[in-house]
Image (spheres, helix red, strand yellow):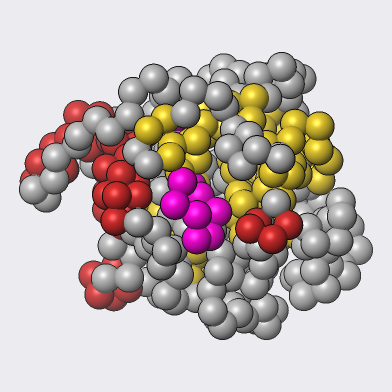
Amino acid sequence: MLDFPPSASRAARALFAAALLLFATSACAAPAADTWARAEGLRATPVLRGLRAPVFVTAPPGDPRLFVVEQPGRIRVVRDGKLLERPFLDLTDRVGYGGERGLLGLAFHPLYARNGFFFVNYTDKNGDTQIVRFKAGAISDVADRGSASTVLSVEQPYANHNGGMIAFAPDGKLWIGMGDGGSGGDPHGNGQSLGTLLGKLLRIDVDRPPYAIPTDNPFANRSGARGEIWAMGVRNPWRFSFDRGAPLVYVADVGQNAWEEVNVAPVTGAGLDYGWNRREGLHAFRASPPRPNTLDPIEEYAHSEAARSRAVTCIAAGRSKDCRARTSFPTIASAGSSPSAGWTGAPPTCGSGGSARSAR
Ligand SMILES: [Ca+2]
Ligand SMILES: [Ca+2]
């Protein structure tokens, strides 16, 4: 997934690649990642200092700057390789930070250069998930804090498993990764319940504020189900990425106590069940046999393995033959949301299997 907007400068590409590697090695268990990186002939080089708990790097389409999400609640700008002192946006007064809580996600609208809209995903002072739209400010490196407009709020029953990823799909719809709410083992069965947004991948249309449910969402017209749901059965989808060259989405889901997993699904795969909490990775958890629309991960690894970096490897090489050869999809009904031609979506994102420190 090391894809860049065509206009990105060489320096920005190099910086991002280095930052991504750094991010990967810090988000994963560092010793394992270091071992893997050395085996692959890679070396981590610090490219920025002065960041506090960075958890994500992205940029608007065609924009040479980089935007770094700091978990305590700030978005920082990197321009020409230098970290700007003044934050792009400071939400520390409304973000509840600590453990798995904080400012967790950022997505620029595909038409950001025209409309200035971007979206953040954070947990507030009560620990609840907030998806909020902001607008660019009069100064290009500083956003308009006063433009805040809530898109979606989701009550969180426990401190952990808040998901955090938001990204625009190739068709311009916003996807949101929602964890199962927290505790351990999904005690309320949220992952398998269509009546809650917890434990799901959501898909909404933010071009009709605050948002609209796309008519081709799989449960848009089902009684008792939340229409925002695109896929179910995830535990804590800390990061996911859309492939810019193929109609695929890569979803890293954090395991319970035994198995971490990486999933690859058709971007048109409406209504897929990623298995949790019936299954953890390729193994039975609360129940055994996978149901017909269950998507098993393409890659899993045990907590006992010193191999957290495999998740990063798989995502980085997502279009390689090796990764594809092991991809098999269940037979599903497509909702027909085919990716648009001329992809202009968000550029690079990094998904790791989740850090043992930051996403359990
Ligand atoms: Ca939670
Ligand atoms: Ca799964």
The vertical placement of 328 against 49, above or below, is below
The vertical placement of 342 against 347, above or below, is below
Is residue 55 magenta-colored?
yes
Give percent across and percent down for residue 108. Answer: 62, 52
Judged left or right of residue 238, residue 156 is right
Number of callouts? 0
**Span shown in magenta:** 54-65
- Do we see residue 156 in this rendering? no
Judged left or right of residue 5, residue 195 is right
Give percent across and percent down for residue 228. Answer: 78, 58
Give percent across and percent down for residue 202. Answer: 70, 55
Judged left or right of residue 316, residue 260 is right
What residue appears at the point 29 percent right and 67 percent down from the top-left corner? Answer: 323
Name the quarter where the N terminus is drawn.
bottom left
What residue appears at the point 69 percent right and 44 percent down from the top-left corner? Answer: 136
Is residue 70 magenta-colored?
no
What residue appears at the point 32 percent right and 53 percent down from the top-left corner? Answer: 13
The vertical placement of 35 against 315, above or below, is above
Examine the image and state in which quarter residue 257 appears.
top left
**Frontmost residue, 331 versus 127:** 127
**Frontmost residue, 166 versus 232:** 166
**Frontmost residue, 171 versus 253:** 171
Give percent across and percent down for residue 298. Answer: 37, 62
Examine the image and state in which quarter residue 128 appears.
top right
What residue appears at the point 55 percent right and 54 percent down from the top-left corner? Answer: 60
